[in-house]
Image: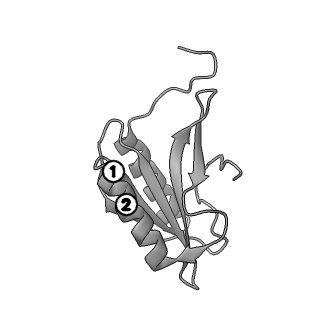
Amino acid sequence: MREHDEPRLKTGLWVSAVLRQANMSGRGAVRLRKGDEDAGGVLAILVNRARQAVVLTRTITGEGRRAWIRGTGIAPVSEEEAAAYVDRQVRRDPDLWVLEFETEDLEPPFEAQVLQD
């Protein structure tokens, strides 16, 4: 194992914990699509009251750390644009998990390093 590698938590367990944490803090959170329990990728759709969205894609940095990138870009997009992005990604990777979170600031309600674009 490389020096900076993080221990790998099974994706299904991580998803359950994050959804529970978000819902307990009063933020709506749902699983829209179940992916591979052990090592599926994750897309997190962040939606605000104005129905603007940002889709985050989980990735691994060159140093072996988990991070997120803004798959739909820096600026918020419509829910339709977010859904189209998710559909394209799921066609490429049928093992993806898709989660949706209600968040006014369009920031993840879970601990996340979001890489700059």
Residue in the picture at 36% in, 36% down: 39
Q: Position of residue 48 (x, y in %)?
A: 58, 77
Give the amino acid at mark 2: Arg
Left or right? Give the position of 86 relative to 45. left
Q: Label 1, secondary structure: give it.
A: helix
Q: Please tell me whether residue 49 is drawn above or below residue 60 in the rendered image.
A: below
Residue in the picture at 36% in, 52% down: 97
Residue identifier under label 1: 92
Q: Residue 63: which quarter of the image?
A: top right
Q: Position of residue 98 (x, y in %)?
A: 38, 58
Residue identifier under label 2: 88
Q: Please tell me whether residue 57 is drawn above or below residue 80 in the rendered image.
A: above
Residue in the picture at 33% in, 48% down: 93
Q: Residue 75: which quarter of the image?
A: bottom right
Q: Please tell me whether residue 7 is drawn above or below residue 43 in the rendered image.
A: above
Q: Nearer the viewer, residue 93 or 113?
A: 93
Disc 2 to disc 1, C-alpha distance: 7 Å
Tell me if label 2 and label 1 are in contact, CB under 8 Å: yes
Give the amino acid at mark 1: Arg
Q: Which mark is residue 23?
A: none
